Image (tube, grey):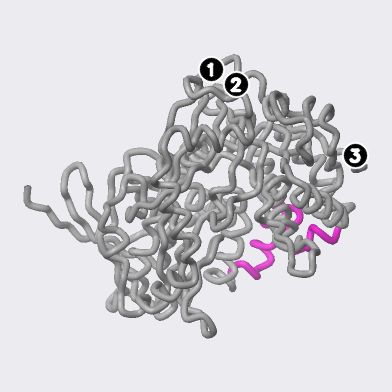
Amino acid sequence: MAKKKTTNQKGPDVILIGAGIMSATLGVLLKELQPDLTIEIYERLDSAAAESSDAWNNAGTGHSAFCELNYTPEREDGTIETSKAIKIAESFEQSKQFWAYLVQKGFLSDAPNFIRSIPHMSFVWGEDNVKYLHKRYDALQQNYLFHGMHYSEDPAQLAEWMPLVMDGRDPAQPVAATRMDIGTDVNFGALTRAMFRRLSDMPGVRLYFAHEVRDLWRSKSLGGWKMRVENVTTNQVREVQSDFIFIGAGGGSLRLLEKSDIPESRGFGGFPVSGQWLKCTNPDVIEQHQAKVYGKASVGAPPMSVPHLDTRMIEGKRELLFGPYAGFSTKFLKSGSYMDLPKSIQLSNMAPMLMAGLHNIPLTRYLIQQVMQSPEDRLNALKEYFPNARMEDWDLEIAGQRVQVIKKDENEGGVLEFGTEVVSAADGSIAALLGASPGASTAVSIMLDLMKKCFPTRLDSPEWQQKLKEMIPSYGQVLAKNPQLGHELRRHTSEVLGLTQEEQMPEVTR
C-alpha cells in the first residue's frame, strides 16, 4: 500500500516519543508547571507502558537501594561504597513525593493500584559474603535513609522472614540477611497507564498510539525540530514540527538520537541485554513468600541480572518471580528488529563499541553461558534461593530488553555503563534518555535533571520554583543530609500512599 503524506505547519510546544514512565512523568511535570503547554505523545505500539515500563518486563520494583547489592560495591580496601545507594534512595523519595502530590490532587485516584509496601531483603551465604553484608549494613547505617534496617545471621530469624529461602537449606551454611520493612512494590505499567489516561484528558494534550517516528531533523524554516511519523495502521505519513522533543523510547531511543545528528549524540552506542523470568504457577508456593529477596550477582553479570525471588502485585494478582536470567539479542526492544544493533553502528561510535567489547569479555562470556542454559540449569539457580523448588511449579517467561549505554572514554576508548544517561543538545531543544536500571524508580529525579538542561530559564522562574516545591517538597535540598525533613516527608508520603511507616532504630541479631 502506498504511503500517504501530509504536513503539519503548526505543531505542539512539546513532543514526547514513547509512552513509557519517563514520557508520562515529564508530560505531567510540564503540564503542572505550565498548564497552557501543548503536548503530543507518539507511541509505536497500541498501548502505553508496553515495553520497559510493563510489570512483566522487569519494571516492577521500587528501587530504593535497600536490597540491591550492586549499588553498594566493596572497594579494594574492603570498605563499602554507599554514594550510589544514597543517591538512589533520595531519588526514590522524590518519586514518592510526586506520586503523593498526584494522589492528593486527585490526578491519581487509587495508590494501591500501583504501589504497595513489601519488605526488601538482601540474602547471602558463605563466610566472605556474610562479612560483606554486615559491612554493608554498618556502612548504610551512617545515613538515616537506611535506619530501620534489620540485620541477622540467625537461621531461625531468617526462617521467619523468608521461609521458602530457608526451608531445606544446609544448617551448617553461613547465612545472613538484611530486611527493610518500608520497601515497596511498584507496578510501573499500571502507574504509567493511569498517568497517561489523565494526561490525555487535559486540554492541549494528544496521545497517538500505533504511530512510529521514522525520522527527525532540525527545521531550518520554522526553527525547532521536524519529525516524520507513520500511522502503522493506515500507513499515512505526516510531518510534525515542535520546539522541543523528548526521546523516551527505551531501547529505541538510541537510533532516534542518532537521526537527530546533534554533536552530543556522537560516540554513543548501545549493548542490548535480554532477559527471562521463572514465574511460579503454584498458588500454595506463592502464598509462602512475601518479600523481595535480592542476592549477589554472578561474576561478569550485568546489574539488571542480579537474582531475586520477587513478590509482585500485577493486575490485582499476587505473583512470584525468580530471575532475571540474562541473554543476548540484537533487538533493542522486545517488539523490535534483529537489525536494531547493526543499524545503530556508525563511524562515530564504532571505536567506542569495539573497545567496550574488549573491556567486557567476561560479560560476553556470561551472556553466552546464560543463553546456553538448560531448564535444569535455571532450576539449579532457583534452588540457591529456594532449595525445595520443583520444576513443575514454574514457567519460563520472556522479560524486556535493556540497552546499556556505550560511550567514548579518553582513557579506555569506550566504556559500557550501567545506569541511565540524559543526552541533550546544547540549546536544550532535544533530549534523549539512554540506559536502564534503576530507571523507572528514579524517573522524577531524572526528568528534573532533564528540565535543568532543557528549560533552564523557566525552571529558575519564581513560578516554576514555587510549583516544584509544592509537588516535590524536598526539591532543591540534599535530602540525605536533612534527617528532620526526610522523616517528615516519609511519614507524609506513607500516609497518602498507604505504605508502611518507617522504624527509627536499626536492629542486629547475630
* Residue 94 seen in the figure: yes
Q: Which residue is mark 1?
A: 282
The amino acid type, in three-letter code, at marker 1 is Asn
Question: Mark 2 or mark 3, which has the lower sequence index?
Answer: 2
Q: Viewer-nearest of labels 2 and 3?
A: 3
Q: Residue 307, image x and y in percent? A: 59, 43
Residue 478 within the segment the image draws in magenta: yes
The residue at the point 61 percent across, 30 percent down is 311
Question: Whole-Å distance between the Cαs marked 3 and 1?
Answer: 34 Å
The residue at the point 55 percent across, 32 percent down is 321
What range of the chain is rendered magenta?
458-482
The amino acid type, in three-letter code, at marker 2 is Ile
Asked if residue 418 is positioned above or below residue 225 in the image, the reply reads: above
Asked if residue 410 is positioned above or below residue 276 in the image, the reply reads: below
Asked if residue 405 is positioned above or below residue 96 in the image, the reply reads: below
Q: Which residue is mark 3?
A: 510
Q: Are marks 3 and 1 in contact (CB under 8 Å)?
A: no
Q: Which residue is mark 2?
A: 286
Tell me the element at label 2.
helix
Q: Which label sits on residue 27?
A: none
The residue most toward the top is 284
Q: Residue 56, image x and y in percent? A: 47, 36
Residue 429 within the segment the image draws in magenta: no
Question: Whole-Å distance between the Cαs marked 1 and 2?
Answer: 6 Å
Q: Count the marks: how many?
A: 3
Quarter of the picture holding the C terminus: top right
Task: Tell which of 29 and 125 is nearer to you.
Answer: 125
The residue at the point 79 percent across, 58 percent down is 479
